[in-house]
Amino acid sequence: MTPGDTPAGSYVLGTEPEEQERLRLQHELWRPAATAAWERAGLGPGQRVLDLGAGPGFCALDLARIVGPGGQVLALERSGAYVAAARAAAAQAGFHQLEVRAVDLGGPAAPAPLGNSAPGIGTGGFDLAWCRWLAMFLPRLEPLLDLVATSLRPGGVLVAHEYVHWNTFGLHPDGAAIARFRDAAIASFRGAGGDPDVNRRLPSLLAARDFGIEELLPLPVLGRGGDPWARWLERFVTLYGNELIRQGLWSAEEAAAAAAAMARARLDPGAYWVGPTVLALRARRGQHP
Ligand SMILES: C[S@@+](CC[C@H](N)C(=O)[O-])C[C@H]1O[C@@H](n2cnc3c(N)ncnc32)[C@H](O)[C@@H]1O
C-alpha cells in the first residue's frame, strides 16, 4: 500500500518496489508484441494516444518516443505511486508530450476528474487508445468503454492486450502445486471484482458500440529452463503467492511445494511453463461522428 492508494481502491497486485520491478521486467518481455501491435494499428509521429491503466509508465514512455514532440500521450492511472513514477520518468526523458493523470477508470464518473483541461477526452481527439492488463481488474467495463468510445476520433483505434484464457497458466509435467496457485490467483482476481478472462467479452462489447473488430490474435507464452519467460512466471508465483497467503487463498505449505516444483523444473530439460494466454484485440471506432 502506498500513500496514493486508498484501501477501497487499491490494486490487487500492489505497488511495492518489487511489483514495480516485476512490471518493468514484464514490459521488457512484452514490448515487442506491443510495438508490433501499435505498428499494425498505424501509430506514428504526431499522433495523440491514450494509455489506459499506465502503471509506472513503461508503455507510455515508448509511445511518447514514437509520437515524438509533435504528438501527445495522455497516461491515465489510479495508483498515486505509479503516477509519480511515470511523471518522474517522463521528466527525466524530457518528454513534454507525455502527461500523466491520476484517474480511477473503473469508477462511475471516470472521465470527470479529467475536466476540460485534457483536450480530446470525451471529444474524440485521440488517434489510438492502448490498454494492457487493465480491463481485467475493473469491476465494471462501461466507464472504460465510454471513455474510449468518446475519446477516440471516428476511425481511431483501440488496441487492448488482455488475457483471454488465464487457465492455461501451468508448469508441466510436475504442475500440481502451480495449478493450485493458478486457481487461487483466479479466485483472488475475481474476488477483487475483476475478470482475468476479460478479453472474452471486450470484442462483443465494442462491436455493440459500433467498433469494427480488426484483429483478434492470441499470444501464447512458453518458458523453459529458467529462460526469461520461465523467470517471469516464477517471479509472479513467488511475489503474488505472498499476497494470496495474506488473503487466505493459499498457504505457506503450498508455496513451499510450488518453490520445490519450480526448482525441479529448472533442472529438467523436458519441463516447461505455459503462460496465461493474452488476446491482442484491435478495434476501430465507426466513422459516425
Ligand atoms: C498489471 S498493471 C499493467 C500496467 C501497464 N498497463 C503495463 O502494461 O505495464 C495494471 C495497472 O492497472 C492499474 N489499475 C487497476 N485498476 C485501475 C483503475 N480502476 N483505474 C486506473 N488504473 C487502474 C493498476 O494500478 C496498475 O498500474
Image: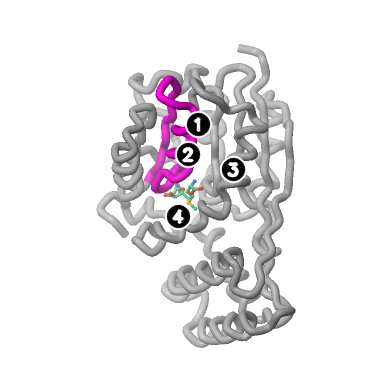
The answer to whether residue 50 is seen in the rendering is yes
Give x and y (percent) for residue 98. 38, 31
Q: Which residue is mark 2?
A: 62
Residue type, numbered disc 2: Asp
- Is residue 52 one of those drawn in magenta? yes
State yes or no: discs 1 and 2 in contact (Cβ < 8 Å): yes
Image quadrant where one finds the C terminus = top right
Give x and y (percent) for residue 118. 37, 23
Residue type, numbered disc 4: Arg
Q: Secondary structure at mark 2?
A: helix
Foreground tag (1 vs 4): 1
Does the numbered disc 4 mark a residue whose Cβ is under 8 Å from ligand 1? no
For label 4, the crowd category at 10 Å Cα-Cα, with few meaning under 14, some 14 to 19 and many 20 or more, is some
- Determine the residue positioned at 42% across, 35% down: 75
**Disc 1/disc 4 C-alpha distance (Å):** 19 Å
Q: Which residue is mark 4?
A: 24
For label 1, the crowd category at 10 Å Cα-Cα, with few meaning under 14, some 14 to 19 and many 20 or more, is many
Q: Which residue is mark 1?
A: 66
Does the numbered disc 3 mark a residue whose Cβ is under 8 Å from ligand 1? yes
- The image quadrant of residue 102 is top left
- Is residue 85 one of those drawn in magenta? no
